[in-house]
Amino acid sequence: MRIQQVILLVSGVALVAILFLFGVTKAPKKEEVAMPGAMQEGVSAGMVSVDFNAILDKACLTLSDNQRDSIAMVEMSLEKSRGEKDKAQTLIHLGEDWTRTGNIIVAGKYFAEAAAINNDIKTWEEAANRFFMGFPNAADSTVRIFAVQEAIKCYEQLRKLDT
């Protein structure tokens, strides 16, 4: 072996020994990413809490006067409804009205509320499908999160009822 090869070999072994003895062996700590204010409150097990009333308020701004009046009348009849069956039928009617306005995710929420009352497979399916159909068209990311979470809940209820 030449002297240059020996020097190169010894310096390589010395460099590896120095890195092994004095090098950083701990993984760096991951920094926590700050979440927007609305998302910080309800984070648990990967689920983010989204306020439906905020979504409803945004949806109400897109309605015409006739649509707003029609929905307000159905909401008043919802408040006056007696019994669970009557309330579920009114919620379904309200969901159909919201579907006609093009606010499918809001309609899905009303169908989900009706399904929770009457525990009917068809109503759960209507709610889940509305959330699923409304998800791609939602402009706001919080509305998308809400739609996906609600669709998952509805599909899980469907799975429980109809295996």
Image: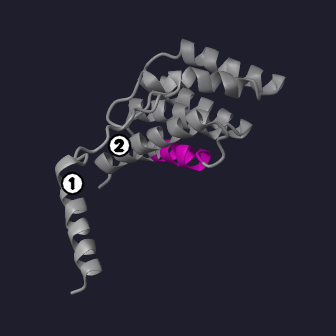
Residue 128 x %, y %: 48, 45
Residue at point 40%, 32% (across, down): 32
Q: Gap in Å between the C-alphas at discs 2 and 1?
A: 60 Å
Q: Identify the coloring.
A: one colour
Q: Nearer the viewer, residue 86 or 150?
A: 150
Quarter containing the C terminus: bottom left
Q: Give the range drawn in magenta.
A: 125-135
Task: Check the picture and name the quadrant holding the N terminus.
Answer: bottom left
- The residue under the point 32% across, 37% down is 29
Residue 48: image x %, image y %?
43, 31
* SS under mark 1: helix
Q: In this view, does 157 lie to the left or right of 66?
A: left
Question: SS for tag 2?
Answer: helix
Q: Residue 157 carries which label?
A: 2
Residue 102 colored magenta? no
**Res 47 quadrant in image:** top left
Residue occupied by mark 1: 18
Name the residue type under label 2.
Gln
Main secondary-structure element of the magenta-colored stretch? helix
